[in-house]
Amino acid sequence: MIASGRTVPDIARSLGLGENIIYRWRREALGSTALPDSPQVAASQISLSEHLALQKRLREVEMERDILKKAVGIFSRLQ
């Protein structure tokens, strides 16, 4: 996306990510200075599609949690 001329803030907004992640990915794509066993390298091995899938699943789980909280409130008032 950057190679096609889009700005980092624009990419971050369209993907729902922080700008710092895009900058980090760009830096790592151009050549990482991190050591092979460092957490930075392990975190960078997650692909964009995996990251987006995890974000979607997190939103689903948060919605389920909120629904359960409301249900507990309703049932506690009925007793």
Image (tube, rainbow, N blue to C red):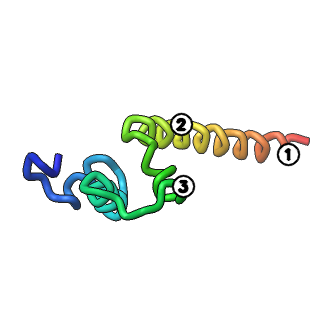
Amino acid at the residue labelled 1: Ser
Q: Please tell me which residue lies in front, 70 or 35.
A: 35
| Label 2: few (<14), some (14–19) or many (≥20) C-alpha neighbours in 10 Å | few
**Mark 3 highlights which residue?**
37
Q: Please tell me which residue lies in front, 65 or 36.
A: 36
Amino acid at the residue labelled 2: Arg
Amino acid at the residue labelled 3: Asp
Element type at mark 2: helix
- Per the rendering, the mark at residue 76 is 1
**Mark 2 highlights which residue?**
57
Query: Which mark is nearer the camera, 3 or 1?
Result: 3
Query: Which mark is nearer the camera, 2 or 3?
Result: 3
Q: In the image, residue 69 lies at what x, y percent?
A: 72, 46
Q: Is there CB contact under 8 Å for labels 2 and 3?
A: no
| Label 3: few (<14), some (14–19) or many (≥20) C-alpha neighbours in 10 Å | few
Q: Residue at x 21, y 59 (%)?
A: 8
Please state if 6 lies on the left or on the right of 60 as rendered. left
| Label 1: few (<14), some (14–19) or many (≥20) C-alpha neighbours in 10 Å | few
Task: Determine the CA span between mark 3 and mark 1.
Answer: 50 Å
Mark 3 or mark 1, which has the lower sequence index? 3
Q: Residue at x 53, y 59 (%)?
A: 38
As displayed, is residue 77 above or below residue 26?
Answer: above
- Residue 60 quadrant: top right
Query: Which mark is nearer the camera, 1 or 2?
Result: 2
Mark 1 or mark 2, which has the lower sequence index? 2
Q: In the image, residue 62 lies at what x, y percent?
A: 60, 44
- Residue 79 quadrant: top right
Q: In the image, residue 14 lies at what x, y percent?
A: 25, 48
